[in-house]
């Protein structure tokens, strides 16, 4: 190929590229569609929760569109989401966020799954001043960086198990308790740990074991042997699904007796299904439960959401799906109040959000975290061989009484 | 630093038993790696992923209602053919090449396996239940899950079986001959191609056994293979190639060291301590070697 031909091709491709960029940069609202962008993990290690997230988003999009859509300036618009698969990889997630914003011209973003990926995307959306409503990044550090365009519908990680310590103190007659804790060394679990440290300080409780579990570790025998030897009042474990499953397996095998066991990720780990009776009495932090009595006009209440979701996707919605659906409700509300598609006006409207959804009340604090919704605790209870999660705290939502202390292994059938 | 273990000496018994039982299981994986390394000069990065795949085979059996312990028989049979197929597809093209090429190739296999397992079995952490109960010693102050004892017992059984097989059988002798000198073995009529395929298969089968045992003692996830690769690599580095007793001792030593590091330094240093140990051993070995070299001069 001669030089002139090469030059010609370069020229043509440059023009095409420019045209493509120009034509897509107005994609924020196309005809009657409001286009949102989302990078979620459809493959890789977060793929199951990534799919829960996507299903939650899709469910809400469909519901809002079929119930009148979003009214802005007297005209009804529909939501549409452009998805990319971030392969559970933070670098890829950040690249895709750039791509959504620069190439696809998206002006409003939905969050990915997990704190780590949200952390990767937030600087990008912040740089381009793109409002992002996220539903699956709970790490406290997301809300202390002064991000102005980040809004999270879920409670921050440090609140996950604080309630559990309060409950333990209450059960101990208001006296301080002795806490043993084991947390994985990742951003989320360490934030949960900070919450426990705060609660311990507040109640004057003592932390007698404070283990940090390496990410690669799937054996907690040493920690549990220490627990057996020191007999704390409450054992707290947080290490995603692996931590929850390992803890229950080894607690039951090593016959570790503790009066109270508090954990995270029980429902994601399908504890009651995978470990059955051995997981009974475990106390778990959750963002949402179908029995809560919050309501909105799109999904009705939690139970209705549970039913509709099951019908649509064939499985019961984990809280990851519920909170993802709630993110869309927040966007709809903000667009209508802003009555405009101007990014900054939408952002300001988001900032003043104060609403109830089936998932819980939503109101954003200065850092973008949801300050209106408490975490709930449920306890695994079994009847025969079927185990269920029963809400036990806070008292306002409790459907069952909190069982305390956990019976000793020698007394358990 | 925490000295709880010295205040409550019974914890030492617990730590030692936990360490040894786990170490035996690691030693089995490491032995497969040593075998392959010795015979084919291939460091298999996909070792841990073969283990996890073996675990998923046992888990699948558990899902359809068969007791997962049968996995220690079914899983190695399937895994032997997986290993054999991997050899025919990929490894035979890199076996004579530079070590770096084979590391890259097995690294590639590891990634493909992880993604495939994620695709087939999902990204959830899973466990299989053996319902074996617990052995309690010293008035319940030391507890040993029977599943771990079972795992150690099966590991020992397979290791002994393999040693006898290597000594007595025709293929075993061919494998050992190839390990000593592949060219000479070839000249004397050993079909080295077949030996390589069998070695890769045997290694995969050992991984299958270990995986089935891990499914009932620990947890399974498509992406947790690497720690098993790293641990077996370390055991082999310490023990040397083709020396089963050394691999066993080094495996148990590593298990013990890990448990005690956990108690004394804290859980967060458990894996870090193991890596420190590796560095020390490598430095020590170099030091010894350089001394020898001076002597030879």
Image (cartoon, rainbow, N blue to C red):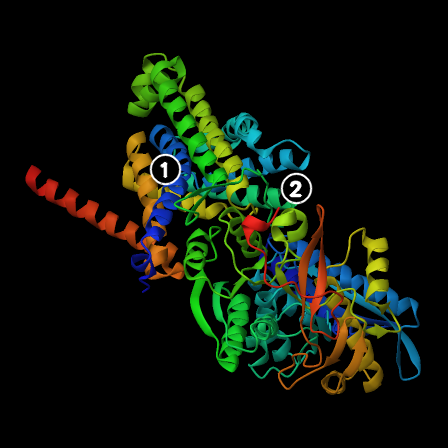
The numbered disc on residue B120 is 2
Distance between the Cα atoms at labels 1 and 2?
A: 33 Å
Please tell me which residue lies in front, B118 or A387.
A387
Please tell me which residue lies in front, B170 or B251.
B251
> Residue placed at 39% from the left, 31% from the top?
B36
Is residue A218 found left or right of A29 in the rendered image? left
Is residue B241 found left or right of A182 in the rendered image? left
The vertical placement of A241 against B142, above or below, is below
- Marks 1 and 2 on same chain: yes
Residue B125 at x, y percent in the picture: 59, 49
Residue A308 at x, y percent in the picture: 86, 59
Residue B272 in view here: no
**How busy is the neighbourhood of tag 1: few (under 14 within 10 Å), some, or many (20 plus)?**
few
How many callouts does the rendering have?
A: 2
The vertical placement of B88 against A354, above or below, is above
Please tell me which residue lies in front, B221 or A87.
B221
Please tell me which residue lies in front, A90 or B21.
B21
Element under disc 1: loop
Residue B8 at x, y percent in the picture: 33, 57
Element under disc 2: helix
Residue A120 in view here: yes
Is residue A309 found left or right of A157 in the rendered image? right
Residue A232 at x, y percent in the picture: 47, 64
Is residue A205 found left or right of A294 in the rendered image? left
Q: From the image, tell me which residue sits under label 1.
A: B98
**First in sequence: mark 1 or mark 2?**
1
Q: Chain of mark 1?
A: B
């Amino acid at each position: 190929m001669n030089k002139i031909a090469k030059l010609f091709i370069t020229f043509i491709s440059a023009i095409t590229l420019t045209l493509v960029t120009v034509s897509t940069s107005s994609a924020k609202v196309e005809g009657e569609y409001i286009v949102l962008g989302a990078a979620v993990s459809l493959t890789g290690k977060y793929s199951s929760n990534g799919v829960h997230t996507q299903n939650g988003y899709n469910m809400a999009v469909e519901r809002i569109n079929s119930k009148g859509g979003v009214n802005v300036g007297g005209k009804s618009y529909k939501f549409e989401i452009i998805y990319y698969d971030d392969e559970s990889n933070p670098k890829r997630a950040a690249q895709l966020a750039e791509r959504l914003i620069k190439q696809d011209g998206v002006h409003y973003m939905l969050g990915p799954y997990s704190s780590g990926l949200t952390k990767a995307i937030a600087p990008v959306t912040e740089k381009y001043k793109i409002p992002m409503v996220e539903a699956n990044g709970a790490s406290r550090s997301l809300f202390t960086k002064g991000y102005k365009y980040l809004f999270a519908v879920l409670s921050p990680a440090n609140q996950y198990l604080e309630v559990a310590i309060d409950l333990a103190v209450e059960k101990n007659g208001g006296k301080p308790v002795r806490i043993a804790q084991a947390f994985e060394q990742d951003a989320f679990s360490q934030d949960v740990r900070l919450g426990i440290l705060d609660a311990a300080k507040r109640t004057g409780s003592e932390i007698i074991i404070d283990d940090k579990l390496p990410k690669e570790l799937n054996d907690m025998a040493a920690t549990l042997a220490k627990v057996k030897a020191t007999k704390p009042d409450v054992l707290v474990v947080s290490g995603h699904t692996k931590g929850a499953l390992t803890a229950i397996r080894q607690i039951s095998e090593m016959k570790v007796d503790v009066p109270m066991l508090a954990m995270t990720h029980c429902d994601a780990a399908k504890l009651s299904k995978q470990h059955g009776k051995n997981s009974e009495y475990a106390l778990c932090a959750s963002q949402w439960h179908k029995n809560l009595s919050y309501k909105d006009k799109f999904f009705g209440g939690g139970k209705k959401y549970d039913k509709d979701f099951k019908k649509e996707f064939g499985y019961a919605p984990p809280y990851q799906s519920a909170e993802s659906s709630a993110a869309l409700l927040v966007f709809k509300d903000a667009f209508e109040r802003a009555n405009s598609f101007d990014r900054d006006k939408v952002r300001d409207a988001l900032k003043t959000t104060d609403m109830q959804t089936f998932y819980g009340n939503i109101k954003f604090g200065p850092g973008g975290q949801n300050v209106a919704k408490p975490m709930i605790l449920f306890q695994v209870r079994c009847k025969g061989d079927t185990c269920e999660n029963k809400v036990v705290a806070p008292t306002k939502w409790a459907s069952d009484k909190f069982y305390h202390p956990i019976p000793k292994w020698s007394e358990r059938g | 630093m925490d000295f709880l273990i010295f205040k409550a000496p019974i914890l030492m018994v617990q730590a030692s038993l936990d360490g040894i039982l786990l170490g035996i299981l690691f030693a089995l994986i490491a032995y497969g790696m040593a075998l392959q390394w010795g015979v084919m000069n291939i460091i298999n990065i996909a070792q841990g992923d073969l283990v996890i795949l073996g675990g998923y085979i046992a888990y699948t059996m558990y899902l359809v209602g068969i007791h997962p312990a049968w996995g220690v028989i079914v899983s190695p049979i399937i895994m032997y053919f997986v290993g054999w197929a991997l050899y025919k597809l990929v490894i035979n093209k890199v076996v004579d090449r530079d070590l770096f090429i084979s590391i890259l190739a097995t690294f590639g296999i590891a990634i493909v396996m992880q993604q495939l397992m994620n695709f087939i079995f999902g990204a959830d952490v899973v466990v299989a239940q053996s319902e074996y109960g617990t052995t309690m010693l010293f008035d319940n102050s030391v507890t040993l899950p029977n599943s771990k004892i079972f795992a150690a017992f099966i590991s020992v059984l397979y290791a002994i079986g393999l040693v006898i097989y290597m000594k007595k059988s025709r293929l075993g002798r061919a494998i050992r001959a190839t390990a000593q000198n592949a060219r000479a073995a070839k000249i004397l009529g050993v079909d080295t191609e077949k030996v390589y395929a069998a070695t890769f298969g045997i290694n995969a089968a050992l991984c299958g056994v270990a995986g089935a045992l891990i499914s009932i003692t620990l947890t399974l996830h498509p992406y947790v293979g690497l720690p098993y690769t790293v641990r077996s690599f370390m055991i082999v580095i310490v023990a040397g190639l083709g020396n089963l007793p050394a691999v066993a001792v080094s495996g148990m030593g590593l298990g013990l060291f890990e448990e005690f590091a956990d108690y004394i330094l804290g859980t967060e240093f458990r894996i870090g301590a193991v890596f420190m140990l590796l560095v020390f051993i490598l430095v020590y070995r170099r030091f010894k070697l350089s001394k020898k070299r001076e002597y030879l001069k």
